[in-house]
Image (spheres, rainbow, N blue to C red):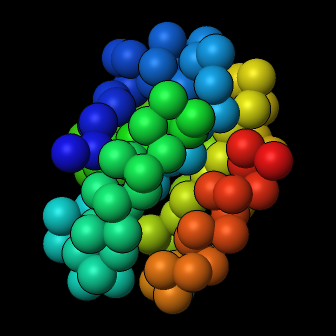
Amino acid sequence: MTAHVTDADFKKTVLESKIPVFVDFYAEWCGPCKMMAPFIDEFAEKYDGKVLVVKLNVDEAMDSAQEYGIMSIPTFLSFKDGKVVDSITGGMPKETLQEKLDALIA
């Protein structure tokens, strides 16, 4: 199961992580987000210990979503050493997401 982050723990969980972090900005009502969710859960297990894969509900963590300029969902941000190193938006093939995660640990 994928971990969830909130505004309260975003800094500690994402920005201070010792390993790269892949954040899925989503909402419960978002159709494309629901289509991507099984991939995100699968990647959380597959990359365990290499990449921290987390979900952030934009309706519940508006400050973090606003800080990173999230205008469309799903949006996926990749973080290394507390900085955004990659960003992609929208529903996409599983392989595209996997390429992003592989690049994050390369």
On the image, the x and y values in percent for residue 47 come to: 49, 45
* Residue 17: x %, y % from top left: 59, 18
Quadrant of the image occupied by residue 29: bottom left
Q: How many marks?
A: 0
Relative to 32, is 29 above or below? above
Image quarter of the N terminus? top left
Establish if 43 lies above or below 53. below
* 90, 35: nearer the viewer: 35
Q: In the drawing, does residue 16 fall left or right of residue 87?
A: left
Relative vertical location of residue 2 with respect to residue 52 in this rendering, above or below: below
Viewer-side residue, 47 vs 96 = 47
Give how far across and how far down residue 32 sits, in percent.
34, 83
Residue located at (28% from left, 36% from top)? 4
Q: Position of residue 83 (x, y in %)?
A: 77, 31
Give left or right: position of 85 versus 56: right
Which residue is drawn at the image coordinates 73% and 44% (left, top)? Answer: 105
Residue 48 visible (yes or no): yes
Query: What residue appears at the point 52 percent right and 85 percent down from the top-left corner?
Result: 92
Horizontal side of residue 97 vs 40, given as left or right: right
Tell me the residue at 66%/47% (across/down). 78
Residue 33 in view (yes/no): no
> In the rendered image of this protein, does residue 73 appear above or below residue 91?
above
Question: Left or right: where does residue 9 sit relative to residue 1?
Answer: right
Q: Nearer the viewer, residue 34 or 98?
A: 98
